[in-house]
Image (cartoon, helix red, strand yellow):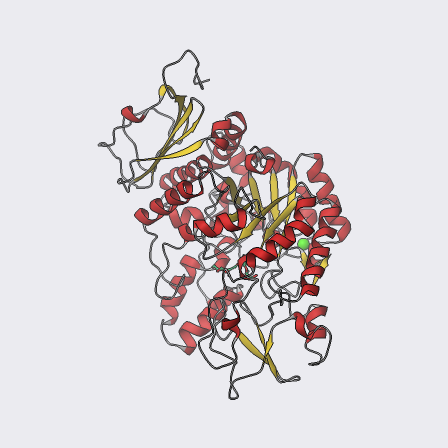
Amino acid sequence: MKAWWKEAVVYQVYPRSFCDSNGDGIGDIPGITSKLDYLKELGIDVIWLSPVYASPNVDGGYDISDYRAIAPEFGTMDDFDRLLGEARARGIKIIMDLVVNHTSDQHEWFVQSKSGRDHPKRDWYIWRDGFEGQEPNRMTSVFSGPAWTLDPFTGQYFLHLFAREQPDLNWENPEVRGAIFETMRWWLDKGVDGFRMDVINFISKPPEALCADGGPGGECVNGPRVCAYLEEMHNEVLSRYDIMTVGETHGITPDDAVKYAGYESGALSMVFQFEHVNTDAGPYGKWTTMKYSRPELKRILSQWQTELDGRAWGSLFWGNHDQPRAVSRFGDTSDAEAWEKSAKMLATCLMMMKGTPYLYQGDELGMTNLDIRALDEVRDVETLNAYRDLVEEKHIYTRGEMMACIRKAGRDNARSPMQWSGGPNAGFTSGTPWIQINGNYRDINAEAQRQDSSSIFRYYQKLIQLRKQFPVMVYGRYEPLLPDDDRVAAFRRVEGDDVLLVVCNFTGEALPDMELTNLLPAQAGLLIGNYSEPAESLRPYEARVYAGKSAASGAVLYDGR
Ligand code: TEU
Ligand code: CA
């Protein structure tokens, strides 16, 4: 079935780093509004807005203290309404970040919950007695250290799967669910077009994981009632609006994706899976300098395409505000040529697979990782906690080793300000930016790329236009090709007798032995590619897409014009 959100291209805005309108060094909502024409020019359909709610900002706004207020540093509710209206006037939809696995510890609900063991909101969070004067069990938080923190006033521990300033809500309590659903309706009635749901498969905790027995605790992903809660959310809220929803779901299999977002009975439009961005993890998770595995990446991408076929709609992304920059990670930044070619190749591969593509701000310019040299340049709580844990407490890494891991994998890499121009502060702010600006902004910026018809920006723009022109790019079946050749991602998209052939060279080598001719569809024309001169065989990081027909017929899908 067709749906607008299957045809859409989504662009993620991380507000703090997008555009600062008033010179306080912090990106804000009027700043986003001022860049809508830029986004329209790029051609995107939907903005995923990372949190703009009131927040003490311990975790970049993912610690919310009031779900119905805008953080003053981002603007006012009037500013938000104006953004929504101006976006709509340009045909751009906005989806909000829904962060309801946890709140901030400053949220009124938590303040009340911790005010006394008998408070009616006590049970809105997850409280346990300690075990022999220690944490209830040995469960650890995603952000290092114990997942339990003692509240000295009431003498019990509360659960936090992330920072201790992010207590987990108790979804078992129907009042909690009711309050969340009401908030969701409030935003939808205002006119937002859906939600990206933060760690939504963490909301149901297996009872064993919470045992106060001093044991190991347990995994809180894909718990026993996730589906039940999502179904309830669907009935109470989602099914009443024409919206899109995407669940952030770490640690899922394709079968889980079908449970949460299947065509038949899934509550959500789609989910994000993360397997393909975990092939460069090591014994200490993301904190390693290991390169990603090309064969693994290829296998995973292809497997998700194949396994979701006919069962669930997929989502496509190379990065987001939690991941390093795509071109630094999966491409090649060793010289200007490799940078440009590999960024365009990644864009091609992403946009040509089946699913809704999500671009992260700055990826359309090929923005790269930050060169963080000192710990006091780090802003991200996950990174700072991991440093304390792995360097200071466990002595697993030396300072220098950990700094190398941070440069490769830290979340600040994606959070440096948008590079709008080669002018002061990259055109992001007239003040002092809250986080350092990438030193390469004079070479890599929006102003320069808008003036250059062969830029990465113009290439993304063309890919997005093609997606509107060729329904096979959206709805076509995915057919893997050359499964044993790790150097390339090669596949077909097929819809009726329309065929696209996609070949992406993930290596920095020319591939003279790669035979393309026998893969070509009938009446093939080159739809898009990242080299301007034709050539027989694939060049370093070359990407090519041919459009044609499944058999020689009178019709031509694309005649090269
Ligand atoms: O991320 C969930 C999450 O698990 C991440 O912490 C991820 O594992 C890690 O950052 C990878 O480097 C979501 C948000 O996207 C993230 O920004 C929040 O910090 C987190 O939830 C808590 O709300
Ligand atoms: Ca500002």
Q: Position of residue 406 (x, y in %)?
A: 43, 62
Please, is residue 547 above or below residue 387 in the view? above
Name the quarter showing ligand 2: bottom right
Quadrant, the N terminus: top right
Please, is residue 21 above or below residue 376 in the view? above
Please, is residue 289 above or below residue 452 in the view? below
Q: Does any portion of residue 350 appear in the rendered image?
A: yes
- Of residue 108 and residue 258, the one placed in the foreground of this image is 258
Identify the image quadrant of residue 108. bottom right
- Of residue 394 and residue 99, the one placed in the foreground of this image is 99
Please, is residue 68 above or below residue 11 in the view? below
- Of residue 289 and residue 476, the one placed in the foreground of this image is 476
Horizontal side, residue 218 vs residue 507: left or right: right
Q: Position of residue 477 (x, y in %)?
A: 43, 32
- Residue under the image location 34 percent in, 44 percent down: 298
- Of residue 35 and residue 136, the one placed in the foreground of this image is 136
Q: Position of residue 148 (x, y in %)?
A: 54, 76
Give the residue furthest to the top.
554
- Residue under the image location 74 percent in, 49 percent down: 79
Give the residue furthest to the left.
513
